[in-house]
Amino acid sequence: MKVRDLMWTHVITAESGSLASHAGIRMTVGKISGLPVVDSEKSLIGIVTEFDLVRALRADTDLAATSVDELMTRDVITVEADTPVDEVMAILERERILRVPVVSDGNLIGVVSRSDILEAALIGVYVGGGSQS
């Protein structure tokens, strides 16, 4: 099975330069723990997570006066749509992350998360085990 079979293509994002407080509201309302950050051409430039926002709050950062660019991770681990799900699971485990943006030519086309993979396994769509296509 490939990432394209599980990824979400309607991705909630934060735009470069947007306020961290707005990203936090989008995460809270959408019940998601992180947002890919894109530029005006929709190219992936980073990712901002609840962890980033909580760390900023602990440092007394005003989220309403701080852009996501100041808090986001810039060196984002990504995959492509034809990446095998087994490879994504290894990345998620090794890096201890919850989600991986899916890109094509640097542009964000989707996101796949641990919960997406778990859900597919529980409903029998994905059964794991190496060399499925």
Image (cartoon, rainbow, N blue to C red):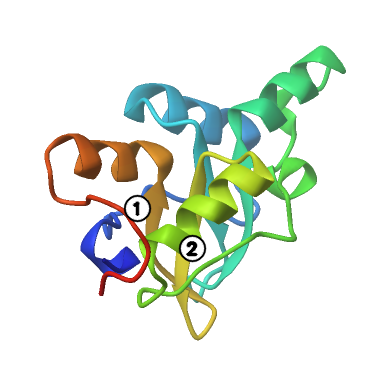
In the image, what residue type sits under mark 2? Glu
Whether residue 14 can be seen here: no
Secondary structure beneath label 2: helix
Q: Is residue 127 above or below residue 32?
A: below
Which residue in the protein does label 2 denote? 87
Q: Is residue 114 above or below residue 53?
A: below
- Which residue corresponds to the image point at 67% horizontal and 27% vertical from the top-left? 51
* The C terminus - image quarter: bottom left
Q: Position of residue 132 (x, y in %)?
A: 27, 69
- Which residue corresponds to the image point at 14% horizontal and 50% vertical from the top-left? 125
Q: Give whichever of 93, 30 is nearer the camera.
A: 93
- Residue 46 shows which numbered tag? none
Local crowd size for mark 2, using a 10 Å CA cut-off: few (<14), some (14–19), many (≥20) = some
Instruction: Give the quarter of the image for residue 108.
Output: bottom left
- Is 106 situated left or right of 32 in this image? right
- Which residue corresponds to the image point at 87% horizontal and 18% vertical from the top-left? 59
Which residue in the protein does label 1 denote? 11
Secondary structure beneath label 1: loop
Whether residue 56 can be seen here: yes
- Which residue corresponds to the image point at 26% horizontal and 66% vertical from the top-left? 1
Q: Give whichever of 110, 117 is nearer the camera.
A: 117
In the image, what residue type sits under mark 1? Val
**Structural distance between the alpha carbons of marks 1 and 2:** 21 Å
